[in-house]
Amino acid sequence: MVIGTNLTAAFWLFWHARGEMSGETTLKATPIVFVILNAVVLWSIRAKNRRLQLATPTRVVVTAIILALLASGCLWAALHRDLDFSHEILNEAVSSKPISAIKPESRAILVQLLRTRLQNSREQNADASRLKPITPALYSAESFENENVIQSVRSQVEAAASFDLSYAGKQQTAMNEFRARMSKADPAYLESFEAQRKEANDEFAKASSQEKQWLEATTALYDFAAANHKMIGLKGNQLFFSDSRVKASFEDKKEHAVDLLNQLQATEKEEEKRQEKAMPDVPLSKLGLRGN
């Protein structure tokens, strides 16, 4: 009787959690339902035993308490997993299923987030395929050949960085909209979602800061080269300087910019590894979840 009651309650709560009832409501109701049901069951058993002048075995009470705790805990975890980045949700994100047909509302909001970010990624990839590489190559001796080349490379760097930052901005906007909607629909899940994504959020903030620092250092390098172009020359594929102080400053600025670029690339590789570890069977190109 105790086992049957707990299993029935778990099935009923999980069924409603997948329907109209919000995750927050179900999570709050779970412990209350199990406590009340087991209390009623134990009261019924004890009342029946008293009428029959029998003692209620202690193991029945202990079993009811253990089952209530286990069922409540397992269901609590299952409800959170049901709204997590599962393959089922990813499949819904790449499907044509109407958002209005996805229940509960918190799940629909999550799917909408994935669809928006995926669409942003597709558009970014399409635009990126039409971009030409920086010519001459960034930081190469040829990129400092003369003032016109220096200004051209600087403009290309700014355009490439602006393109990347614009994409990250769109992804950030999608995430902000998701947070605003989820905070009303299911704040409990949003809190769990934010906790799970803390590492990703930190990495995004770190990468954004590094990219801005790299862009600032790189444009400063090319600005310095443009301002001193008369003291910089190119022989073959080697630069030469007519002023040792200009050479020293140039090399320091270049080393700083290259170091920042290496740090940024290392951060992006770590982010890719993290995503692959979290969802090993789903190609990153399919997800399009770069950016916070």
Image: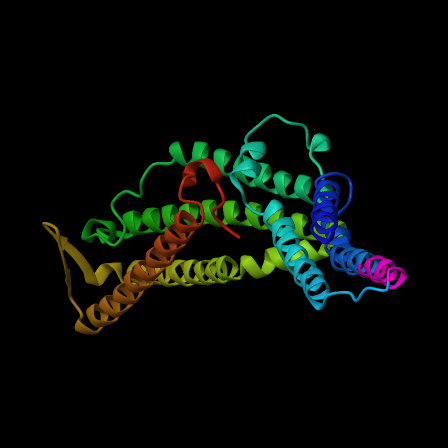
Residue furthest to the top: 96
Count numbered badges in the picture. Answer: 0
* Residue 4: in magenta span: no
The residue located at (62%, 58%) in the rendering is 192
Residue furthest to the left: 236
Residue furthest to the bottom: 245
Of residue 128 and residue 15, the one placed in the foreground of this image is 15
Of residue 231 and residue 284, the one placed in the foreground of this image is 284
The residue located at (49%, 44%) in the rendering is 289
Up the image or down, 120 lies above or below 187; here it is above
Give the left or right position of residue 119, taking residue 219 as reference: right
Place of residue 84 in the rendered image (x, y in percent of width and height, measured from the top left): 58, 47
Place of residue 283 in the rendered image (x, y in percent of width and height, measured from the top left): 41, 38
Up the image or down, 221 lies above or below 94; here it is below
When asked about the image quadrant of residue 270, the answer is bottom left
Give the left or right position of residue 260, taking residue 170 as reference: left
The color scheme shown is: rainbow
Give the left or right position of residue 40, taking residue 8 as reference: right
Place of residue 1 in the rendered image (x, y in percent of width and height, measured from the top left): 74, 50
Assign the magenta stretch its main secondary structure: helix
The residue located at (40%, 50%) in the rendering is 277
Place of residue 177 in the rendered image (x, y in percent of width and height, measured from the top left): 67, 48
Of residue 291 and residue 181, the one placed in the foreground of this image is 181
Q: Which residues are magenta?
A: 42-52
The residue located at (54%, 33%) in the rendering is 91
Residue furthest to the right: 51
Up the image or down, 53 lies above or below 165; here it is below
When asked about the image quadrant of residue 240, the answer is bottom left
